[in-house]
Image (cartoon, coloured by chain):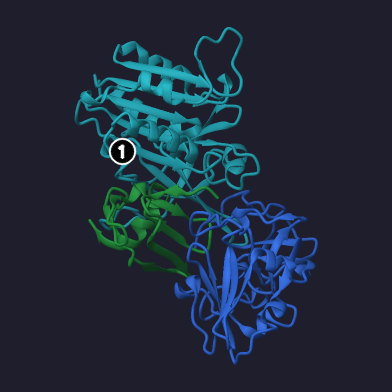
Amino acid sequence: MTALDGNAIGGTLHEVFSAEMTAAVGTCATCGATAPLAETLVYLDGPGVVVRCRACTAILMVIAKVRQYNCVDLHGLAALG
Amino acid sequence: MSPITRGFHGRRRPEADADRVPPGQFVTEDFPVLSAGPTPHTALDKWTFSISGGDGPQSWSWEAFRALPAENITVDIHCVTRWSKLGTKWEGVSVDTLLSQVGHNARFVMAHCDGGYTTNLPLADVTGGQAWVAFNFDGKPLQPEHGGPARLLVPHLYFWKSAKWVRSLELLTKDEPGFWETYGYHMYGDPWREQRYAGD
Amino acid sequence: MAGTAVRGRLTWQVAEVASVLPETPSVRTIVLEVPDWAGHRAGQHVDIRLTAEDGYSAERSYSIASAPGEPLSITVERLEDGEVSPYLTEELRPDDEIEIRGPIGGYFVWDGGDDRPLLLLAGGSGIVPLRSIMRYRAQTGSHVRVRALYSSRSWTDVIYRDELDSYRQDGNADILYTLTRHQPSGWAGHTGRIDPAWLTEQAWPVNESPVAYVCGPTSFVEGVAETLVRLSYPAAAIKTERFGASGGQK
């Protein structure tokens, strides 16, 4: 699969954060790079959504929809604003 | 409850082999590529496969691994994202062969892969002729996007357990959640009991 | 029930198909009526959800083709062996209902508030959100300079051709087409992809503070964005939106 970008999960991010998030700037906890979430590397065909830093490919965020709940792991983000 | 969309049925069609298709699955002729990250590319001269956590580490280079006895198998595979592919042909080394030289008292294994992916399985489900480290698909070397040079193949469980780019099996005495299991996917993953999520 | 009742929440609403309009042999625009639609910004998209009788559902995202203030429309390309696009481009008809949520997006948007020249770069169906931008620009009487480079497989695959050509009339907009697979006889335009040399020639110089919007398949976007970076476009001046390898999830 080809990776998409954070625009493709705009709806999911809005669901999780109750706000538009594609323009929100994330800071990678692994390499320190900052970028709008729209510019992240996104893998979304599998069991869940994996959002990676475009600069170093480390995982920023994982969103898995388990039944009606979103399980969200934000450990890979040092900051999100 | 979502309103029904008139005339929409997706790609699916009534299954000819309904008893080969677990509940909630549909059959595909493609081989979808699903990933959690960029495709790793490990050169064969750097590639190793290891067993850890037993009475001594065991490791094979690509050459040594390919010198092991291998089998041709034809199996149906079932992805938790609901597609199933019937009659897929693989060639691989049985995990029984790989474990045969290692003493251990493990009851579980964790597969570790290039790119960082992990998945856990009971030892009983990767032995007894149920699991392979597969290097050929459909008579040709396994493509990187499908897990090549080698992936774990455990067809009786949901395909997220058939870890791509597998590099080692870690022997464990207790079950621990791997990547998707940590996020709420089922620890075991039997497609016939539709064990997609924890608690199913 | 109003989908926008709770501030911040994005909820699924039922939309009715008002009309369908063929654009090219494989592309169709679908005009939707959504009760209490709160409007949108140029460049945003919507998520669509279809549900079969047995409860099976599929979701896809489509860029909004209409300008802010116009009836909501999306433009969908029929993808070979797609799951959703053949339904939307061939089966769906007026009065049908589909679920929709949106508008979505706050990054790949243009609100027309400044006069930075626009560089719009489209690969295939990537033209859709850029057309929304162009339409909005025309509607608001904006004089912002715009140069659009639009890559299609062939002349019959060019979406919104006449409309895009009409924008040249205001004197500040330039639309350039490139055809990658087949060109009509006598074609004097560019051929092949939007290559670095052509893009370098056409891109607004960095000292004019341009902003680029790049949309299309992932490989298209990455190739083009890389050239803009080499032209010293700052990261904040390059907005990207990637569709799947074949132009979108199918």
Q: x and y percent of residue B22 in the render? A: 69, 70
Q: Is residue C171 left or right of residue C242?
A: left
Q: Is residue C31 left or right of residue C36?
A: right
Q: Quadrant of the C terminus of chain C?
A: top right
Please tell me which residue lies in front, C218 or C11.
C218
Please tell me which residue lies in front, C148 or C102.
C148
Q: x and y percent of residue B94 in the render? A: 72, 74
* Chain A drawn colour: green
Establish if B135 lies above or below A54.
below
Q: Single out the residue that lies furthest toward the bottom.
A: B105
Q: Single out the residue that lies furthest toward the top.
A: C186
Q: Specify the quadrant of the image occupied by residue B103.
A: bottom right
* Chain B drawn colour: blue
Q: Residue at x 70, y 82 (%)?
A: B127
Q: Which residue is mark 1?
A: C109
Q: x and y percent of residue C236 in the render? A: 26, 39
Chain under callout 1: C
Q: Residue at x 41, y 64 (%)?
A: A63
Q: Specify the quadrant of the image occupied by residue B77.
A: bottom right
- Three-letter code, disc 1: Val
Q: x and y percent of residue C17 in the render? A: 49, 40
* Chain C drawn colour: cyan
Please tell me which residue lies in front, B136 or C164.
B136
Establish if A70 lies above or below C136.
below
Is residue C70 shown to the viewer in this render? Answer: no
Is residue C125 shown to the viewer in this render? Answer: yes
Q: Quadrant of the N terminus of chain C?
A: bottom left
